[in-house]
Image (cartoon, rainbow, N blue to C red):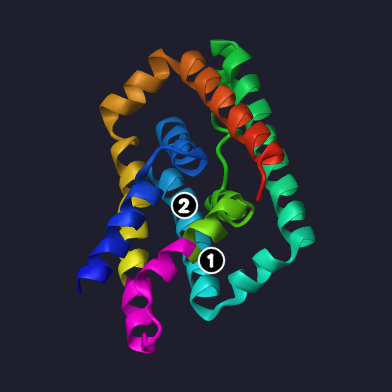
Amino acid sequence: MQHLLLVWAAYIVAAGSPGPSTMRIMGVAMRQGRQAGLAMSAGVVTGSIFWGLMAATGISALLTQCAHALILLKIFGGLYLIYLAVKAGKAALTPERAVASGAKNGQSRHWDLYRRGLLMHLSNPKSILAWIALVTLGLGPNASWQTVAIILAGCAVLSVSIFCGYAIVFSTAPMVRFYSKARRSIEGTLAIIFAYAGVRLLFARI
């Protein structure tokens, strides 16, 4: 039981720490509301569970042996983060009048937000490596499939709690009011964070 708690604690730190996915959920929740934030959270959760299943079955370990696959994933993930940085930068430079007039037309459909969250998590090679580390930490040489299932189930519950929790907290009325007052600063900060994360991922050694 102790090693399971260790795995779940490590997952909380890895998933709950501020990063591109959590920052994107925060931005969407403040800008478009709770339902939109939850839709993006669902995509991120799906991506996390997917890599967890891949790690548990050993497929992601095989993927790490293929240098070309990881390099392509790293390039795609880095470019996608830079694309998000450009979008956030444009939002920061958009005048308030243009934002107000285009608010209704700019609302993304929930399926589109789900897809974006999923794509963000699937295109991050660090998610693969983190899950491999978690599974390795939790599984011994004689681990059973029941242990694997418990680890994945626990991480799935934590994933929903963490990412959906971000969406719920940052879609509350005080946070929405804060966003409306500091929209340009928030979007500008997100642009810098996404750009930094994208460049760092592009030049990172996997």
Label 1: which residue?
51
The residue drawn where x is 67% and y is 32% is 199
Hey, which quadrant is residue 90 in on the image?
top right
Residue 43 x/y as whole percent? 51, 56
- Please, which residue is most extreme toward the front here? 141
Residue 42 falls left or right of residue 60: left
For marks 1 and 2, give the one nearer the viewer: 1
Instruction: Tell me if residue 146 is in the magenta stretch.
Output: yes
The residue drawn where x is 36% and y is 85% is 143
Label 2: which residue?
39
The residue drawn where x is 48% and y is 14% is 185
Residue 137 x/y as whole percent? 38, 67
**N-terminal of the two: label 1 or label 2?**
2
Q: Is residue 164 above or below residue 188?
A: below
The residue drawn where x is 28% and y is 29% is 173
Instruction: Provide the residue span drawn in magenta.
Output: 133-153
Hey, which quadrant is residue 115 in on the image?
bottom right
Dot 2, how many residues are within 10 Å of its Cα: few (below 14), some (14-19), or many (20+)?
many
Give the prevailing secondary structure in the magenta stretch: helix
Viewer-nearest residue: 77 or 182: 77
Amino acid on which disc 1 is placed: Trp
